[in-house]
Image (cartoon, grey):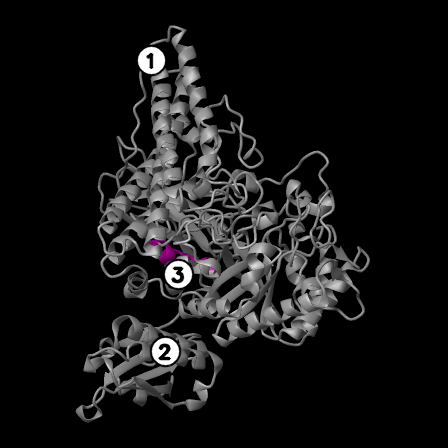
């Protein structure tokens, strides 16, 4: 007996493309269970599509009316009467087509993973926590990316998976891999296929603009593939966002573009781009929005940029359908936002979540000092970079000042790929955190740059080499995204519902690894996937993804004797580990600041490098224990299990490497301040241990990964782990030479400094009003169960990273503490963020709220004004 499906109720709704697609998945899932011998696994599934307001129909299966708002649904399944045999009835109601599709996809996933019998009595209600849940895929290499761009089978599987995980936006980005007008990057432009995208996609009446080497047939094929991708994205209920990140037709200098652009010059550039955009939007009506990089790196100098972008926005408006205009936030000012105020255009500012990296889940409490100071240097051409490098420099790497409650433009975030481009990632706790905090300040959501972003960037690609595996047993070819299926599950599902049932991701692990290995890999992935985001968050050696990635780390020395120029432009003096700021200097000490605080006995509540080292080691210990259990499972030879275990072993060694490097850096900083050789000896011991861990990574990767994993042409963008060892050894040799030199001089006897990596936890919570009144005092109370607390200081700031934190001592009232934020501060139009620093005798201060055990919470509180109904409802 074959399983079957019948659709009842709103049959016209069933014809809607996303619902028809989802019903087909249910049908496929039923067919996959047809061969099951149990009677409970066979029969007819009657799917009844009901109206969201049909209380009687919903009540028949014990369902409430779906929550209000877009993409919400409810679904319930009942078993048929005895006369109906194994038949089941699924009632689905939703507020829109996506809601119906999400319910049906969940139905199909449960059938496939657990069987029909698991549906009996099942109920589910869903409503999105995050409005925009996106994935961005970049075209970066003509060699590595053109094959998947044209492959129809690739898009079927890939888009099926994204839509099934409740992503509702897919962004295909062209031209993001080159930055115009910024030094050596611009001079090295070679692989410009689809960088200045228009002439690769369409002929424009009245213009004879061509990409040399791309004939009419190839250009038409490119347009047809783009149209296919947009149609298939839309058919699955996702909006299709086209990224046109670069409008530079000529990178100048000595660049040797492989496909020179002809037929356009300064006088025709803006008119051609406007006409080409109009032609493209007419040819592909499924394009729901365009992402533009509107600062100078996108090819348009900033001196008179509103004139160029005005023509572009006019052309988009004239197409006559609603279009989201996504402005990459860096350098965006009021003038650019005003330029989008045209009919049919819906502007959105897309800010970076944490520089160009994936860090901890919360948004940095403050940005680095170097981002808060306008850049000034001799010979600076302000006509090119004057806005972004000037007064708007603080917009580069966070939400800046865009979260004003009265803003007329929506804001969303983009998670850039600097931290982990290659190694598998999968932590439900951090993923839930991203889901919770993607809406800070009323922001609309979050778009992730997918794994392998920028593979083959800047002419470093090779035909057929996007898959980084050397071992044929592990290679996936064009389906390389399947290695990261679990990552997509966590990102998508936990943005839709940060409190989703664990079964949502556990079934994916069972499908990939089997039921015996899956529980252990869930633990290992969760623990070890926090390692590199923590390192990136704290060790902010460069905000740029193409200069810094902790997974393939270009070494920064500890010794002041070794000069490292790689990070020199983006980290302060001394250009060693001592001077590196975290990406959140309000909550984390740099090595040098911590050493100064230890010396002066003036520790604040900031988290120290030694605490971070301990966290890293704890994560590795937990992850390695789980990996050891995987080794005994029956799936140890499964290719996906091998890929996962290999990557996690590498991350474990990286975690120990960075933990000991933090410790070595602290010891060296203390040595510099005291002259005590025992600190230098400790630094050498820790650094030697760190290098030992890093040296084990090439052994793990041998025979698995290619020797040149190319994400670009710079030192941090290519090569492999073995390449990094020589510079590390030079740093160690310099420390040893320094110690030998000290032995030649009779050292003064000094008292060795004692400092700790642990801290106490304050039993205290904030009590604040639900909202505050603008222009009125806002009372803040700290309820303290801990009677040993001696003092508390409130730190507060508008939700504006361009501002500094304010501080006020709190008044003691019994065992509690209280203070009011002044009325002249609450009237700004911004939400307020605050946290406390609490003190007790004999210990250094601690934060309230503090980072939790998973490092996935927000260690400050945000409160909105009563006027911000649009943001908080």
Residue at which label 3 appears: 485
Q: Nearer the viewer, residue 708 or 798?
A: 708
Disc 1 or 2, which lies upstream in sequence?
2
Q: Residues within 10 Å of mark 1 (few under 14, many from 20)?
A: few
In this view, the residue in front, 511 or 170, is 511
User: Which residue does the image show at 35% across and 82% down from the upper left?
Assistant: 92
Corner quadrant of residue 164:
bottom left
- Residue 588 vs 171, above or below: the answer is above
The residue positioned 48% from the left and 83% from the top of the image is: 16
Residue under numbered circle 2: 28
Badge 3 or badge 1: first in the primary sequence: 3
Characterize the magenta stretch by its predominant secondary structure. helix
Task: Give the CA distance from mark 1 to mark 2.
Answer: 75 Å
Seen in the image, is 30 located left or right of residue 260?
left
Q: Secondary structure at mark 3?
A: helix
Residue 431 part of the magenta-drawn span: yes
- Circles 3 and 1: CB distance less than 8 Å? no
Highlighted magenta segment, given as a residue range? 427-441
Report how far apart the C-alphas of labels 3 and 2 lie in the structure: 19 Å
Q: Residue at x 23, y 80 (%)?
A: 41
Would you place residue 752 above or below residue 142 in this image? above
Give percent across and percent down for residue 32: 31, 76
For the C terminus, give its image quadrant.
bottom left
Disc 1 or disc 2, which is closer to the eye? 2
Residue located beneath label 1 in the image = 750
N-term-proximal mark, 3 vs 2: 2
Camera-side mark, 3 or 2: 2
Visible residue check, residue 151: yes
The mark total stands at 3
């Amino acid at each position: 007996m074959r399983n079957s499906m019948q659709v009842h109720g709103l049959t016209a709704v069933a014809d809607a493309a996303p619902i028809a697609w989802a019903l087909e998945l249910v049908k496929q899932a039923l067919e996959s269970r047809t061969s099951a011998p149990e009677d409970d696994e066979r029969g007819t599934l009657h799917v009844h599509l009901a109206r969201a307001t049909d209380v009687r129909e919903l009540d028949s299966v014990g369902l409430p009316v779906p929550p209000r708002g877009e993409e919400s649904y409810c679904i319930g399944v009942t078993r048929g009467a005895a006369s109906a045999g194994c038949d089941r009835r699924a009632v689905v109601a939703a507020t829109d087509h996506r809601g119906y599709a999400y319910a049906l996809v969940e139905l199909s996933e449960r059938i496939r993973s657990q069987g029909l019998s698991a549906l009996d009595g099942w109920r589910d209600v869903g409503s999105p926590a995050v409005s925009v849940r996106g994935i961005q895929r970049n075209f970066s290499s003509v060699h590595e990316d053109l094959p998947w761009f044209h492959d129809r089978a690739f898009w079927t599987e890939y888009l099926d998976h994204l839509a099934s995980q409740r992503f509702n936006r897919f962004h295909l980005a062209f031209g993001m891999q080159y930055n115009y007008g910024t030094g050596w990057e611009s001079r090295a432009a070679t692989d410009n296929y689809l960088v200045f995208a228009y002439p690769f996609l369409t002929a424009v009446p009245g213009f004879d603009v061509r990409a040399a080497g791309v004939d009419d047939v190839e250009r038409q094929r490119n347009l047809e593939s783009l149209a296919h991708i947009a149609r298939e994205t839309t058919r699955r209920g996702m909006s299709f966002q086209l990224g046109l990140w670069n409008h530079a037709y000529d990178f100048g200098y000595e660049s040797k573009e492989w496909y020179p652009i002809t037929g356009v010059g300064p006088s025709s550039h803006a008119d051609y781009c406007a006409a080409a955009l109009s032609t493209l939007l007419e040819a592909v009506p499924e394009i729901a929005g365009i992402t533009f990089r509107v600062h100078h790196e996108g090819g348009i100098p900033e001196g008179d940029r509103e004139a160029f972008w005005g023509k572009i926005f006019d052309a988009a408006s004239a197409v006559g359908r609603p279009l989201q205009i996504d402005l990459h936030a860096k350098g965006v000012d009021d003038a650019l936002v005003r330029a989008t105020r045209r009919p049919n255009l819906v502007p959105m500012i897309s800010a970076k979540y944490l520089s160009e990296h994936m860090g901890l889940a919360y948004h940095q409490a403050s940005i680095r000092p170097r981002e808060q100071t306008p850049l000034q240097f001799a010979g600076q051409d302000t006509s090119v970079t004057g806005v972004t490098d000037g007064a708007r420099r603080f917009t580069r790497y966070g939400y800046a000042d865009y979260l004003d409650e009265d803003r007329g433009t929506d804001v969303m975030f983009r998670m850039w790929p600097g931290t982990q481009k290659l190694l598998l990632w999968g932590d439900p706790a951090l993923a839930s955190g991203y889901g919770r905090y993607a809406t800070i300040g009323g922001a609309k959501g979050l778009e992730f740059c997918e794994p392998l972003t920028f593979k083959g960037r800047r002419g470093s690609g090779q035909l057929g080499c996007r898959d980084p595996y050397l071992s044929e047993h592990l290679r996936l070819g064009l389906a390389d995204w399947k290695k990261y299926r679990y990552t997509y599950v966590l990102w998508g599902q936990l943005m839709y519902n940060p409190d989703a049932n664990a079964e949502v991701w556990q079934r994916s692990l069972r499908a990939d690894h089997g039921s015996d290995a899956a529980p252990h890999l869930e633990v290992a992935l969760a623990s070890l996937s926090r390692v590199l985001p923590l390192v990136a968050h704290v060790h902010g050696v460069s905000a740029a993804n193409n200069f810094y990635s902790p997974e393939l780390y270009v070494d920064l020395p500890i010794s002041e004797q070794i000069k490292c120029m790689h990070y020199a432009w983006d980290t302060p003096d001394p250009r060693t580990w001592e001077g590196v700021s975290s990406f959140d200097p309000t909550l984390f000490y740099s090595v040098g600041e911590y050493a100064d605080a230890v010396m002066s006995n003036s520790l604040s509540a900031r988290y120290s490098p030694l605490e971070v080292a301990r966290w890293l080691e704890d994560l590795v210990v937990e992850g390695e224990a789980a990996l050891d259990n995987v080794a005994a499972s029956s799936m140890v030879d499964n290719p996906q299990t091998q890929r996962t275990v290999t990557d996690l072993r590498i991350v474990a060694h990286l975690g120990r490497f960075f933990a000991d490097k933090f410790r070595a850096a602290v010891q060296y900083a203390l040595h510099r301040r005291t002259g005590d050789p025992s600190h230098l000896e400790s630094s050498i011991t820790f650094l030697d241990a760190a290098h030992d861990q890093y040296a084990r990574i090439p052994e793990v990767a041998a025979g698995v990964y290619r020797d040149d994993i190319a994400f670009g042409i710079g030192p941090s963008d290519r090569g492999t782990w073995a390449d990094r060892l020589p510079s590390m050894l030079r740093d160690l040799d310099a420390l040893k030479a320094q110690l030998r030199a000290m032995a030649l001089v009779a050292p003064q006897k000094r008292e060795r400094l004692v400092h700790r990596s642990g801290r106490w936890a304050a039993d205290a919570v904030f009590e604040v009003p639900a909202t505050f009144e603008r222009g009125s005092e806002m009372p803040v109370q700290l309820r303290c169960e801990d009677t040993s607390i001696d003092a508390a200081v409130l730190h507060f700031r508008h939700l504006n990273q361009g501002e500094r934190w304010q501080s006020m001592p709190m008044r003691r009232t019994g065992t509690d503490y209280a203070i009011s934020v002044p009325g002249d501060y609450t009237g700004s139009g911004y939400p307020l963020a605050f946290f406390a620093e609490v003190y007790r005798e004999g210990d250094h201060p601690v934060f309230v709220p503090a980072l939790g055990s998973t490092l996935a919470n927000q260690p400050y509180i945000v409160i909105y004004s009563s006027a911000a109904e649009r943001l908080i409802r």
